[in-house]
């Protein structure tokens, strides 16, 4: 490994992942606040995915090219989501 590129503390990352799992589970059990619970669950899922990608997949030490390559599918999905939004929202099932 090059200088300055130390391995992440896998135990600390695992503890963070377990804590975020607990937060997501607790949010799903709160009665009434369904919308807030969903936001918390998706936020914790995003944070967990980011922790895994940066630490276990070692993307923290990659060059900018890997992020440019990853950006293309994300932009494609965003364009498709915007283009198909009317079908998702206003789709009427014929009887």
Image: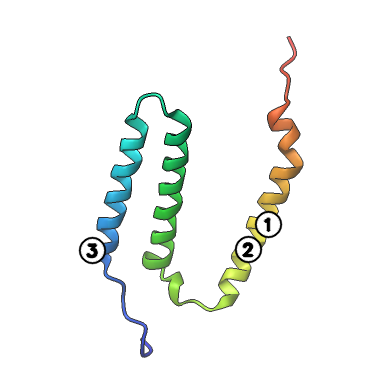
Residue ID for mark 3: 11
Q: How many marks?
A: 3
The residue at the point 67 percent across, 62 percent down is 72
> Disc 2 vs disc 1: Cβ atoms closer than 8 Å?
yes
The residue at the point 31 percent across, 36 percent down is 26
The residue at the point 44 percent across, 29 percent down is 34
Residue nearest the viewer, comparing 64 with 57: 64
Residue 85, position as x, y percentages in the image: 72, 37
> Disc 2 vs disc 3: Cβ atoms closer than 8 Å?
no
Is 23 placed above or below 3 here? Answer: above
Element on which disc 3 rests: helix
Q: Quadrant of residue 76?
A: bottom right
> Disc 1 vs disc 3: Cβ atoms closer than 8 Å?
no
Residue 89, position as x, y percentages in the image: 69, 29
Residue ID for mark 1: 75
Q: Quadrant of residue 36?
A: top left
Q: CA distance from mark 1 to mark 3?
A: 34 Å
Mark 3 Cα-neighbour bin, 10 Å: few <14, some 14–19, many ≥20 = few
Q: Which mark is residue 71?
A: 2
Q: CA distance from mark 2 to mark 3?
A: 30 Å
Residue at the far bottom in the pictured view? 3
Mark 2 Cα-neighbour bin, 10 Å: few <14, some 14–19, many ≥20 = few
């Amino acid at each position: 490994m090059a200088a300055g590129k130390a391995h992440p503390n896998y135990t600390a990352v695992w503890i963070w992942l377990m804590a975020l799992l607990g937060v997501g589970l607790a949010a799903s059990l709160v009665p009434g606040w369904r919308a807030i619970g969903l936001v918390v669950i998706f936020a914790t899922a995003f944070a967990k995915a980011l922790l895994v990608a940066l630490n276990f997949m070692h993307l923290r030490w990659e060059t900018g090219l890997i992020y440019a390559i990853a950006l293309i599918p994300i932009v494609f999905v965003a364009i498709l989501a915007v283009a198909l939004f009317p079908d998702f929202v206003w789709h009427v099932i014929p009887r």
